[in-house]
Amino acid sequence: MVTQSFMKWVLTTSLLSSAAWASKHVVHEKRDSAPVGFTHLNLAPDDQILNLRINLAMANQAGLEAALQEASSPTSPTFREWLTKEQVESFAAPSAETVQAVTEWLNSFNITSTPATPAGDWIKLSVPVQTANQLLNTQFSVFNHTESGQTSVRTLEYSIPDDLQAHVKTIHPTTSFNGPLRGRSPITAISAAKFTPEAEKRATVNCNATITPACLQTLYGIPTTQVSSTTKSSIGVAAFSAQNANENDLAIFLKDFRPDLPSTLTFTTELFDGATNSQTGSRAGVEADLDIQYTVGLVNGIPAFFEDVGSQTQDGADDGFLDSINDLLAQTNPPLVFSTSYGFDVESDLSLSLTVAYCNAIMQLTSRGVSVTFASGDGGVASTPGVQCNGKPFPPTFPTCPYVTLVGSTENVPEIGAGLTAGGFSNYFPQQSWQADAVNAYIANLGTTYAGLYNASGRAYPDVSAQGERVEIVVDGETGLVAGTSCSSPIFSSVIALLNDELLSAGKSPLGFLNPWIYANPQAFNDITSGNNPGCGTQGFSASKGWDPVTGMGSPNYAAMRTAAGL
């Protein structure tokens, strides 16, 4: 329970010295209470240091959005003419007026900030809680996430001067909460024995019993020929939660499941926020091994990058998500496909402003021709397993950013929609024009079923799907079966990386921001018409002809996608 002392506070003497700013403070963002699962413990100590980030308004966000729309629309004369790093930064940079106004405000509290991104649209500063309370006319407190015992310093509302409202998009950490970052793929079975010589025969297993690279190559028509050493294509996977991708596990996986490839193929690790990706003294991470094995093991020699974000994000895993994108934005040549298999319980835990700011960072990355994919989640219409929502509206997953391609799961051969797939409709982002026809057709057929339990005008997801049940990997030298949309995201992403290799070899541009192209080319995917995603005490949505909230537009059909890509 939030105490009366927490909800009521007064301006201190030091704040009164900045009366010119304080007199014009208005609430910038607030939430009525902490999300379910969080409890208020106590006021944050005055001397505790907060590492704040401020997202400044872009000088020309509308221009960037228009440029991306032109580059990503299949009917545009400038289709796939992606922007350069410098062009994106020129759109994203804050105006001189914004920089001056925010700098003067911070200076009035003797606060110095530094840019956190090349464009300068994010700045960072470190201040004691007492100063942050004064700056934002608020009271920071310590909250506890009951399930994990993880604590964080947050507030339920904060204010900024009225004349800064148009210049400041969000300040973090403030009203955005998150529990532990969740990988999407628990191990469902693990063998007790190490690999035997017969393991190489696994490439010919029954694909209804276990999924291997050979199954995917057959099912989706994925090429098997090793790419040229001069390929310009690339793929990256995000890693969080101290997950280590093990090089020895990858070597074993390649030897037994891709014996046609050199077992020396590996990946490049890029470390951020204190990550280590240790190869000794710690167990491999299931999620990390999965992501690397089903990229390196499918992309036939295309360079793969393990983007490892550590725990030194200071103020929660949501910082790590933001870091992973901003780190790529800072690179001259980021991976052309970037897959993430982690997420938070539900969309509403994170604040709208931070979610939109994160989405805008992804928009910048996709404008440069990078395809960003995410596992949609594993809780059906409840988004995450264990979320209590019986009799309540279906909680959307995180993220539902329209610049992300959300990937659901299928299972079996022939394919049906996997029941674990998180699918539905966002409460934070509206339905997108490129998906309107396909999604509205589904809603019309749905009729009054689940009326009031989902936002029919929200951005619909997933966009596509791929196999996500009984996927075989190697962990600590042993075989295991995993399940989840985190299997599906790297699999689908690998298909995109292979198409990019062909496009770039032909002198064409990479696929980049995928979603407008996906919805404009339904014939490029295997339409899945069976399956449902139960949750919240219901049977969930059902797969059907065309787009649906279980399998999106369908699973990859490499030959058809190749044609749709102009090859």
Image (tube, rainbow, N blue to C red):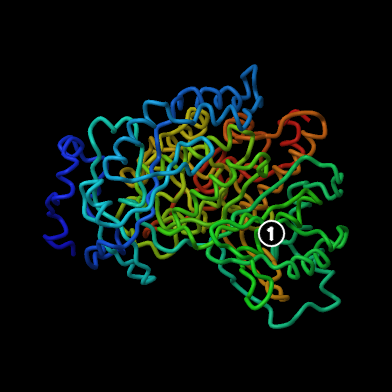
Q: In the image shown, does 20 or 349 lie closer to the viewer?
A: 20
Please, is residue 407 above or below residue 486 in the view? Answer: above
* Left or right placement of residue 202 versus residue 3 in this view: right
* Left or right placement of residue 509 versus residue 397 in this view: right
The residue type indicated by label 1 comes to Ile
Q: List the residue tagged with mark 1.
A: 292
Under tag 1, what secondary structure?
A: helix
Q: Quadrant of the N terminus?
A: bottom left
Please, is residue 318 above or below residue 445 in the view? Answer: below
Please, is residue 276 above or below residue 302 in the view? Answer: below
Question: Residue 102's spot in the image, x, y percent?
Answer: 34, 35
Q: Identify which residue is drawn at 48% across, 53% down.
A: 422
Residue 556: name its quadrant: top right
Question: Residue 109's spot in the image, x, y percent?
Answer: 27, 44
Residue 428: name its quadrant: top left
* Left or right placement of residue 33 versus residue 11 in this view: right
Q: Residue placed farthest to the bottom in the image?
A: 192
Question: Residue 476's spot in the image, x, y percent?
Answer: 69, 75
Q: Identify which residue is drawn at 78% across, 40% down.
A: 232
Q: Identify which residue is drawn at 39% across, 50% down.
A: 347
* Left or right placement of residue 494 versus residue 130 in this view: right
Residue 198: name its quadrant: bottom right
Question: Residue 155's spot in the image, x, y percent?
Answer: 26, 54
Dot 1 alpha-carbon crowd within 10 angstroms: few under 14, some 14 to 19, many 20 or more: many
Q: Residue placed farthest to the top in the image?
A: 77
